[in-house]
Amino acid sequence: MKFKILSAAVFTLAALMVNPGFAQETPEVDRTATGGAQTLEDIMARQKQLEVDDSFRSENLGNQSDAPPIDGPLGTQGGTSVADDYSAIRYNKIDPSTQVRGPATEVLIQDGGMAWYKLRQGPLITYGGSALLGIIALLALFYFIRGRIPIEGGPAGTTIERFKPVERFGHWLLSGSFVALGITGLITLMGRSFLIPVIGQEAFSTLAIGSKWVHNNIAWAFMLGLVLTFVMWVAHNIPNKLDWQWIKAGGGFVGKSHPSAKKFNAGQKIVFWTVMILGFSVSLSGLSLLFPFELFMFADTFALINGIIGTDFPTVLAPHEEMQLANIWHSIVAFVMMVAILAHIYIGSVGMEGAFDAMGNGQVDLEWARQHHDLWVEEVQAKQVKGESS
């Protein structure tokens, strides 16, 4: 429950930052030219998420007190028209019923789609895409300035087992599925804007359908990898006093000192908990999207937040609003994870000599291990000596 609170709170703050339009004042609209009906200015104001005085509609729903049956004469001077019916539903002036059955069918009108669409197609793509391009540029700049971190004094020529096969399997299951999810997710989110102009609508349609299928099914591999890596490594990622010393020394990335560390250093622990916490969050919102209108995250969470800190977040949400919030939150968390994982990939590949071998074949150079995980090497060698003596 605490996690749901954090997820919804962060989403709400993000929505407030990228959507300042709702705070603007109600525009003055002259409806004399339309005889009191809505104007183009009204429609445009709603699309900009401005507050609009709807009294000209909510108070003009036909002769509701003595209107003849719906199948009688229509119009605002007689019975209610279809437009009047839906206006009455929107403003809760009638109590309709429907014979349609299914998830969320009791909601006849939900007008939050435009706000969701604008947030998804605007700030989400702009800020998310900028974050990805920004981290890539920063890593390139860091590589240009710092270069590849070498094994000082050269490799020892002997190796030590860093990760067992089952650990590497869990890691590659998690990382491989995440890469697939990231690519297919970006195609789904940004493809209309960036790919259709390049490959055309028909080609993009095939690509988008395939991406959706891959994304929905690879998600299960990601969640399995998340559980496996958590179980195998959580005990090694508990913060301790060594972590602060590692951070103060810059982790060996600044200068040439190599602070002491056990199996995982502070930087790896940060990546681990980032992936675990955000991975759980993105999985939860992903399940909500995989099973529409069955797993809701936000209404109860907002109610708890309001009770704790006295805010006024909405606590009555239509099922469609829950899905819209889950979709936006899913994308925000995914972008944050991609930024963190890109940095992790850089260090584990071109950024540090000898690092890839840890997940490549499980064996790392002994000198590399001593420089970056000296306390872990001592533990492993002590166990080997104890095993040989026994």
Image (cartoon, rainbow, N blue to C red):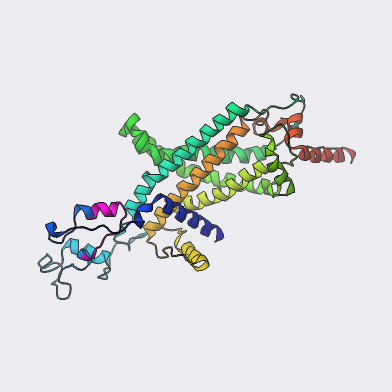
In the image, residue 54 lies in the stretch drawn in magenta: yes
Q: Nearer the viewer, residue 277 or 11?
A: 11
Question: In the image, is residue 241 above or below residue 250?
Answer: below
Percent across and percent down for residue 115 are: 34, 52
Residue in the foreground of this view, choosing between 383 and 272: 272
Residue found at x 55% / y 51%: 280
Along the horizontal axis of the image, is 47 left or right of 312?
left
- For residue 268, what is the image quadrant? top right
Residue 153 lies left or right of residue 60; in this view the side is right
Q: Residue furthest bottom?
A: 66
Residue 169 lies in quadrant: top right
Q: Residue furthest right?
A: 389
Does residue 208 appear in the picture of this structure?
A: yes
Relative vertical location of residue 232 with respect to residue 8 in this rendering, above or below? above
For image coordinates 19% across by 61% down, the residue present is 83
State the residue in front, 28 or 53: 28
In this figure, what is the number of numbered marks? 0
Magenta stretch contains residue 212: no
Question: If the image is split into quadrants, where does the N terminus sit?
Answer: bottom right
Give coordinates of residue 228: x percent, y percent: 62, 46
Q: In the rendered view, does 126 fall on the left or right side of 89?
A: right
Q: Position of residue 160 (x, y in %)?
A: 76, 32
Where's residue 269, x and y in %?
65, 45
Quadrant where the C terminus is found in the figure: top right
**Residue segment shown in magenta:** 42-55
Residue 385, compared with residue 322, is above or below; it is above
Which residue corresponds to the image point at 34% horizontal and 32% vertical from the top-left? 203
* Visible residue check, residue 290: no
